[in-house]
Image (tube, rainbow, N blue to C red):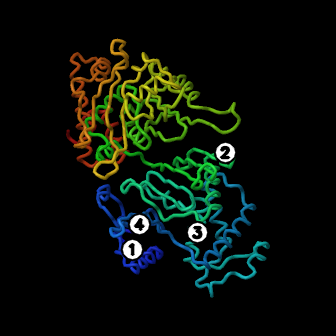
Amino acid sequence: MAENLSEACEKNPHLQTYLDELEEKGKVIPEFKVQLSRDLGSLEYPSIIYPVGDPIFIHIMGDAKEATMEYVAIEPWLTDSELIKYDQVMDSILTKAPQEPVPESEEDLEKMILKLLDLSTEITEEVDGDDENPGFLDNLLKGTSTIKITQDQYDKILYYTRRNIIGSGPIEPLIHDPYLEDIHSIGVSNVFIVHKIFDMLKTNLTFSNKTRLEDWLRSMSERIGRPVSESTPIADGALPDGSRINIIFSEDVSRKGSSFTMRKFSDVPVSIIELINWGALDCTMAGYLWMCLENGMCIFYSGETASGKTTMLNATLPFINQKYKMFTAEDTAEVAPPQPVWQQLITREQGPPESHVDIFTLLKAALRSRPNYIIVGEIRGAEGAVAFQGMQTGHPVLATFHASAVKKMIQRLTGDPINIPNTFIDNLNIAMILQAVYRKGKFLRRCLSIEEIEGYYEEAGGVVTRAVFEWDPASDVHHFRGLNNSFILENKIADKLGYEDKRKIYDDVFQRAKILERMKEEKIEDYYAVLKVIWDYQIKGIDGLPFIL
């Protein structure tokens, strides 16, 4: 990948053309960044170009005069004559494809497409007068035609062939960008993204017309095994890379045009140190969670949509013993335990009703599989009762849950359709409340509180909870309210570990908090580097740490 802008332009002439056009419009040449840092989010109107893999570049185009900021994807573009050649190449590939063996994987498909592309084209040093290949269609039917193109044209046509057949079509740049969280598209040209650093931005991407958008949505819905149509306009599922997509097809349902929302999948989960650096929680909170997960406590990660529930869940899973068997049950694969013994199960909604498998069924199977931890992607209904049965039989359970406060969470658990008896609620040990907040003009994700579920007391008239951590929005600081007053640490974990003096349990929490603090100081942030430190500590104690406490 290019280390500077001039090198990037040399390898990618379309980038130089884009910059020349900016200069002609009187715009300042953007700053080139190989990688982005979160402190760039403090810039009011940044103008930054960064690569997401040749030949694609992204321009975060801030304009102080217009008070706007836009997300501009820079791709190679085809001239009118090159579009004609591209269409001819596609016709040739589609004509030859039926003679090839059916590809069994995406890798086989790519190899086949590249082979057919090479059979369909002839690279020349120069093509006279934008030759449109007279007699091409006649020769195509005979299987003898090749399209004469230059090397530059071949590179462009190769990019668009890969993009449109194997990739994700018009939104391919967004798929390559590692700094995106969500993609929101409403109609033909309203494509927006949620950037990890710059928040919500409108893009320059378009599907050109309604027909192309609908064809694209049909193709994507088939990839997830849930085809959409006028009669079944809504589909939800996971793409091959793990990204989650929700499609709403048909203008009858989505009045501003067919739409979709895609939640990007990250190959490497966010680490707990990254979340600490971003202020989502502090080292003491993480040390508390470490102690709880190490000792089999049940935790619900609760909050509203896009509050960071699954991200937090994944970041804390390294705290669980590496030798434990993990069992995950989800509608869409999002949870990724690092433990090697991991039984991953997904619901099945397609096919005849008798072949459907829901979360309720998966959880019943989990109770017979002898897992050390059961993780539910999200509890919404009757499966909640099975999860609590699992807790009662000694299976620790982790889950995400939609509720913005512990009181609302308990109300949902004890009401329809979950219907957990009040007296069973204390099988759940901890509720972590997460929320997306705007503070001083910035979009942030914060853990608002960690609350312990003490139990149901008739004399108290309900379930008693105890806040052990609280976030102060004024100072953006988390306070440890449960110091020397934690029900879970003293009455559950200290008893389990056989401590005579239960207050010694806080020393264990602070030691783990110190390890996390030292990782932060040493800039050990990568998920797998953090995982190694935590698991080495599990095996060897402080002697296994790569630094001195």
The amino acid beneath tag 3 is Leu
Circle 4 or circle 2, nearest the eye: 2
Mark 4 and mark 1: Cα distance apart in space:
17 Å
Disc sitting over residue 491 in the figure: none
Task: Measure how far apart labels 3 and 4 are at the Cα level.
Answer: 23 Å
Q: Residue at x 59, y 32 (%)?
A: 358
Residues at circles 3 and 1 in contact by the CB criterion of under 8 Å: no
CB atoms at circles 2 and 3 under 8 Å apart? Answer: no
Q: Is residue 547 above or below residue 369?
A: below
Q: Which mark is residue 59?
A: 4
Q: Badge 1, how many Cα within 10 Å: few under 14, some, many 20+?
A: few
Residue type marked 2: Thr
Depth check, front residue: 118 or 185: 185
Task: Say few, some or many: other residues with alpha carbon within 10 Å of mark 3 (under 14 / 14 to 19 / 20 or more).
Answer: some
Residue on which disc 2 sits:
232
Q: Amino acid at mark 1?
A: Glu
Per the model, the C-alpha gap separating discs 4 and 2 is 38 Å
Which numbered marker is on residue 158? Answer: 3
Tell which circle, 4 or 2, labels the residue nearer the N-terminal end: 4
Kindly state the secondary structure of the residue where label 1 is placed.
helix
Query: Label 1: which residue?
Result: 7
Query: For the residues carrying marks 4 and 1, which lies nearer the camera in this image?
Result: 4
Pointer 4 and pointer 1: residues touching (CB < 8 Å)? Answer: no
186 sits left or right of 307 in the view: right
- State the residue at coordinates (43%, 78%): 21
